[in-house]
């Protein structure tokens, strides 16, 4: 079962739990366009070798541009035993629309 979270729900969760982690799985080139301040960046291709460094006991909100790549990462993490991974529905685009209009849309 895939766990999804909206951008507004993610902000509420992060406000209530300061240890929640936002994981940006977009490519390096996409970071030059826009980013969410404080998010951890691991490009999708590096997740298999770096997933062991991710927290398992705090909410892990995974995002990409529109939510498809991050959905695949959440599914991968779930297969590796992560029960805390959530996919940010709509990705950073939804974050820009619903949470932070200062973020550049692309």
Image (spheres, helix red, strand yellow):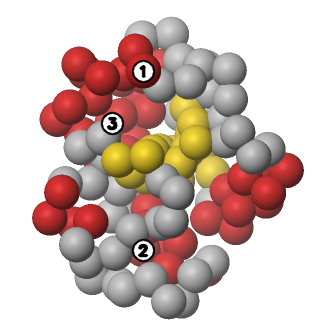
Query: Measured along the vertical axis of the image, is residue 44 above or below residue 58?
Result: below
Instruction: Residue 36 in the image: state x and y as whole percent.
Output: 47, 66
Query: Measured along the vertical axis of the image, is residue 55 above or below residue 19?
Result: above
Of the numbered discs 1 and 3, the one sitting upstream in the chain is: 1
Frontmost of labels 1 and 3 is: 1
Residue at image mark 1 = 53
Residue at the spot 85% in from the left edge and 50% down from the top edge: 16
Frontmost of labels 1 and 2 is: 1
Q: Quadrant of residue 42?
A: top left
Query: Measured along the vertical axis of the image, is residue 38 above or below residue 93?
Result: above
In this image, 53 relative to 10: left or right? left
In this image, 84 relative to 9: left or right? left
Of the numbered discs 1 and 2, the one sitting upstream in the chain is: 1
Mark 1, other Cα within 10 Å: few <14 / some 14–19 / many ≥20: few
Asked if one can make out residue 68 in the rendered structure from this viewpoint, the answer is no
The residue tagged with tag 1: helix, strand or loop? helix
In this image, 51 relative to 31: left or right? right
Residue at image mark 2 = 93
Asked if one can make out residue 2 in the rendered structure from this viewpoint, the answer is yes
Mark 2, other Cα within 10 Å: few <14 / some 14–19 / many ≥20: many
Residue at the spot 22% in from the left edge and 66% down from the top edge: 30
In this image, 78 relative to 32: left or right? right
Assess whether mark 3 and mark 2 are in contact (beta carbons under 8 angstroms). no
Residue at image mark 3 = 72
Instruction: Residue 100 in the image: state x and y as whole percent.
Output: 58, 82
Separation of marks 1 and 3 at Cα, in angstroms = 18 Å
Q: In which quadrant of the rendered image does the N terminus lie?
A: top right
Separation of marks 2 and 3 at Cα, in angstroms = 17 Å
């Amino acid at each position: 079962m895939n766990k999804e979270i909206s951008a507004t729900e993610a902000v509420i969760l992060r406000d209530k739990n300061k240890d929640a982690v936002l994981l940006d799985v977009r490519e390096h080139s996409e970071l030059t366009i826009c980013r969410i301040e404080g998010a951890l960046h691991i490009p999708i291709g590096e997740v298999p070798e770096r997933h062991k460094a991710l927290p398992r006991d705090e909410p892990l909100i995974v995002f990409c541009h529109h939510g498809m790549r991050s959905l695949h990462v959440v599914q991968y993490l779930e297969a590796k035993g992560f029960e805390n991974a959530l996919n940010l529905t709509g990705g950073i685009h939804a974050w820009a629309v619903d949470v932070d209009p200062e973020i550049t849309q692309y």
